[in-house]
């Protein structure tokens, strides 16, 4: 009998064991897709050309190719190559090898940094996974086909060669771009188990790019959502930040909550008042980003955690703590508990605290105090924050308008504004103004 079928079967088994795709790419020429070399950032282009001139394969890859295919402006341009970091580095004047687990090269050109990564190997059984199937180590270098299949979504695994203006596709990504479909490469449940952050990425990218998640990729999410608990804090923070600064934070957060991917959000959005405030914050952020302005992540995290601070402070006051002590203790407790849940890095805590601590001072419009507040380096961000609180009925609208005027008023006008303000005198306000049975949510505002 012919031995070929047996040989093929054995080859198939080996390929499956090694999980190496034995596929060739589908190469789409310039006439078959809309991406042009001139759309590639000049620095990335020069990196690709230098590598190719040295005899290596080099492509623009990932988010940039995807965004251009979907007629969006890419955020950054990454390069993938078959050259190793040691081979890449000497080709450029300022290039640095970074990363321990998987090393890549940062090539600095002018003010830009282009990330150049060597084709990464496919996963093999040697890759350690934890009890939940999460990948603990990434394998070393591999072929371009290996590199393609270890990426997350098919549309994220497309390689653009600016020299020939062709797109190389190992996973059917072009078809999915055309169908506006977000589809995981490989078996969805396995890929989510390997790296549960992919679930968050699916939601974020689908909303950002206005794509439909393929049913097979969507279905396992709810069942596997609890795997998000095992994500290292720094990693989760990175994705949370991307999600909040996507320009679609409002919609994305709603979806993330619907899929129960971030239980921390439920703890933070504990009641209607909190939900309203956080909605406001997210809408502000989205609007700012959409109109090309920047948003400080510190501001956002300060906003997300604020309702919890207010609630905690009021509970303490009801329990008999003095309002200022209650406020300070609430700040520390919430930064510790909820801050951790949201993976807010420690380095942010100082700035968040500053924004919060300035809040009571907006209702202390007496003597020299408004001038001193105006001089604070964090005044502007604290002021924006205060306006948002006013919008959420946490303090009278009049206060917001007063500060709007005060900032640009002449010295005389400022003096009469202070005279008109009618805030309580600054000294020992708590002793004199403590009210009993006050159930409103703002004692720290009016009494300090
Ligand atoms: P964005 O435009 O928001 O940056 P992106 O897809 O470019 O989206 P990056 O985090 O910059 O996201 O990742 C770059 C590329 O690396 C992706 O396009 C994808 O090919 C690959 N990648 C990123 N995260 C993962 C992951 N969790 N698993 C597998 N591949 C990933
Ligand atoms: Mg990117």
Image: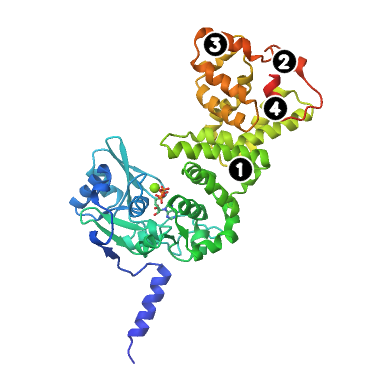
Q: Is mark 4 within 8 Å of ligand 1?
A: no
Mark 2 or 3: in front is: 3
Local secondary structure at mark 4: loop
**Residue ranking furthest to the bottom:** 1
Residue drawn at the location 33% of the way across and 63% of the way down: 145
C-alpha span from label 4 to label 1 = 26 Å
* In this rendering, the label closer to the viewer, 4 or 2: 4
Beta carbon of the mark 1 residue lies under 8 A of ligand 1: no
Residue 202 lies left or right of residue 166; in this view the side is right
Whole-number angstrom distance, CA of label 2 to CA of label 3:
23 Å
Q: Is residue 350 above or below residue 48?
A: above
Tell me residue 262's x, y (percent). Answer: 59, 49
Is 15 situated above or below 78? Answer: below
- Foreground of the two, 217 or 349: 217
The mark that comes first in sequence, 4 or 3, is 3
- Looking at marks 4 and 2 on the same chain, the residue that comes earlier in the sequence is marked by 2
Q: Is residue 8 visible?
A: yes
User: Where on the picture, by quarter, is residue 312?
Assistant: top right
Cα distance between the residues tagged 1 and 2:
35 Å
Q: Which residue is mark 2?
A: 429
- Element under disc 3: helix
Q: Nearer the viewer, mark 1 or mark 2?
A: 2
Calculate the distance from the C-alpha at mark 4 to the C-alpha at mark 2: 14 Å
The residue under label 3 is: 414
* Residue underneath mark 4: 442
Q: Please, what secondary structure does the residue beneath circle 1 have? A: helix
| Depicted 416 relative to depicted 85: above or below | above
N-terminal label among 1 and 2: 1
Residue found 57% across the figure and 28% down from its top: 387
């Amino acid at each position: 009998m012919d031995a070929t079928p047996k040989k093929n079967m054995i080859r198939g088994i080996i390929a499956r064991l090694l999980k190496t795709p034995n596929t060739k790419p589908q190469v789409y020429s310039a006439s078959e897709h809309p991406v042009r070399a001139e759309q590639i950032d000049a620095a990335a282009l020069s990196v690709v050309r230098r590598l190719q001139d040295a005899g290596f394969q080099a492509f623009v890859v990932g988010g940039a190719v995807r965004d251009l295919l979907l007629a969006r402006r890419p955020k950054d341009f990454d390069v993938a190559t078959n050259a190793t970091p040691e081979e890449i580095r000497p080709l450029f004047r300022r290039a640095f090898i970074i990363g321990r687990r998987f090393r890549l090269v940062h090539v600095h050109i002018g003010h830009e940094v282009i990330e150049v990564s060597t084709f990464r190997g496919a996963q093999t059984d040697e890759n350690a996974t934890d009890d939940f199937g999460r990948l603990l180590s990434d394998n070393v270098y591999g072929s371009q086909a290996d590199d393609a299949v270890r990426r997350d979504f098919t549309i994220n695994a497309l390689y653009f060669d600016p020299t020939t203006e062709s797109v190389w596709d190992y996973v059917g990504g072009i078809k999915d771009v055309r169908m506006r479909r977000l589809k995981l490469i490989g078996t969805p449940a396995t890929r989510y188990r390997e790296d549960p952050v992919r679930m968050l990425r699916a939601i974020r990218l689908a909303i950002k790019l206005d794509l439909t998640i393929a049913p097979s990729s969507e279905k396992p999410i709810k069942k596997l959502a609890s795997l998000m608990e095992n994500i290292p804090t720094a990693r989760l923070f990175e994705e949370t930040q991307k999600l909040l600064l996507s320009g679609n934070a409002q919609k994305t957060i709603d979806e993330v909550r619907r899929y129960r991917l971030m239980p921390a959000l439920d703890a933070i959005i504990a009641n209607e008042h909190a939900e309203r405030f956080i909605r406001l914050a997210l809408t502000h952020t989205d609007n700012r980003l959409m109109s090309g302005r920047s948003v400080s992540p510190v501001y956002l995290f300060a906003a997300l955690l604020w309702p919890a601070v207010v609630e905690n402070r009021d509970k303490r006051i009801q329990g008999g703590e003095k309002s200022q002590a209650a406020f300070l203790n609430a700040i520390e407790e919430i930064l510790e508990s909820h801050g951790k849940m949201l993976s807010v890095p420690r380095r942010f805590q100082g700035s968040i605290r500053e924004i919060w601590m300035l809040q009571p001072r907006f209702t202390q419009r007496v003597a020299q105090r408004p001038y001193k507040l105006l001089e604070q380096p964090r005044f502007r961000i604290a002021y924006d924050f205060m306006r948002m609180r006013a919008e959420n009925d946490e303090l009278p609208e009049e206060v917001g308008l007063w500060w709007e005027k005060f900032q640009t008023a002449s010295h005389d006008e400022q003096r009469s504004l202070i005279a008109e303000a009618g805030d309580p005198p600054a000294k020992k306000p708590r002793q004199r103004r403590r009210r009993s049975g006050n159930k409103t949510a703002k004692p720290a505002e009016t009494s300090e």
